[in-house]
Image (spheres, rainbow, N blue to C red):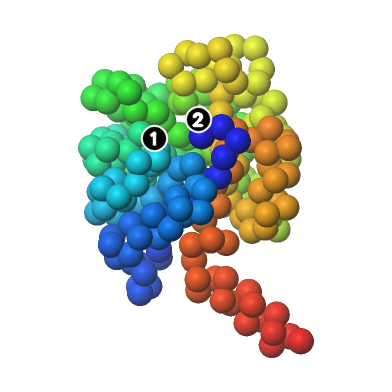
Amino acid sequence: MRGGLVVSCQAYPGEPMLDPRTMAQVAQAAVAGGAVGIRGKGLDDLRAMREVVSVPIIGLVKVGDTGVYITPTLADCIAVAETGCEIVALDGTRRPRPDGLSLAETVAGLRERFPDVLVMADCGSVGDAEAALAAGVDILGTTLAGYTGEREKTDGPDWEVVDGMVALAGSAGARGPAGSDCPVPVFVEGRVHTTAQAAEAVRRGAWSVVVGTAITHPTSITRWFAEAVAAA
């Protein structure tokens, strides 16, 4: 996945596209366009995607929409891993988790059941990333930068967080998946809306770039164009 594009294929509640078959087809289309990986949410969606794509899948579930809601518990992590995903994404912040377990306990519990599954920590800051590394995660994501209250939401990727995470991941003592000698992979995700931003992420040291809304959410893309046309 290094140096490649991961496409996030997710629909929001109440939308016409919120259907496992539809999301699986969107994932297929993304792979046909050159995606080296897929990020998806929901157990049914993940199972449907697993049947039709062979690239790695970053899987998650969302429980609610506030606080720690991205694969928030160990039970959720296990359920996602059971769908056949190579990577389980979970909230990688320092906030309390709903089941009372620490991030380190969650990672250890998942590895006990699924030793080969990688863990991606969706972080909101460099401080989160430091704690996630200490907890033993395999991949760092900038996913939650601007969404936890710790940092302001930027227009586009939070480049300060990106640079900080890349520096942290490449520091002495930081090791990639399974204790490898490569730097810990940093996946830049969150408000990557242009090809220029995606390329800039790679130039700044991102292992992979995850793009969702700008590729797979037609409602948002339509709104961008509609507002521009109306303004003109």
Dot 1 falls on a residue whose secondary structure is: strand
Q: Residues within 10 Å of mark 1 (few under 14, many from 20)?
A: many
The image shows residue 196 at horizontal and vertical percentages of: 73, 52
* Disc 1 + disc 2, Cβ < 8 Å: yes
Foreground residue among 32 and 92: 32
Which residue is identified by label 2? Answer: 139
Which residue is identified by label 1? Answer: 87
The image shows residue 147 at horizontal and vertical percentages of: 56, 52
Dot 2 falls on a residue whose secondary structure is: strand
Residue 152 shows up from this direction? no
Residue 132 shows up from this direction? yes
Q: Earlier in the sequence, mark 1 or mark 2?
A: 1
| Image-based side of 2 in relation to 199, left or right | left
Foreground residue among 118 and 152: 118
Q: Amino acid at mark 1?
A: Ile
The image shows residue 30 at horizontal and vertical percentages of: 46, 54
| Residue under the point 46% across and 26% down | 137
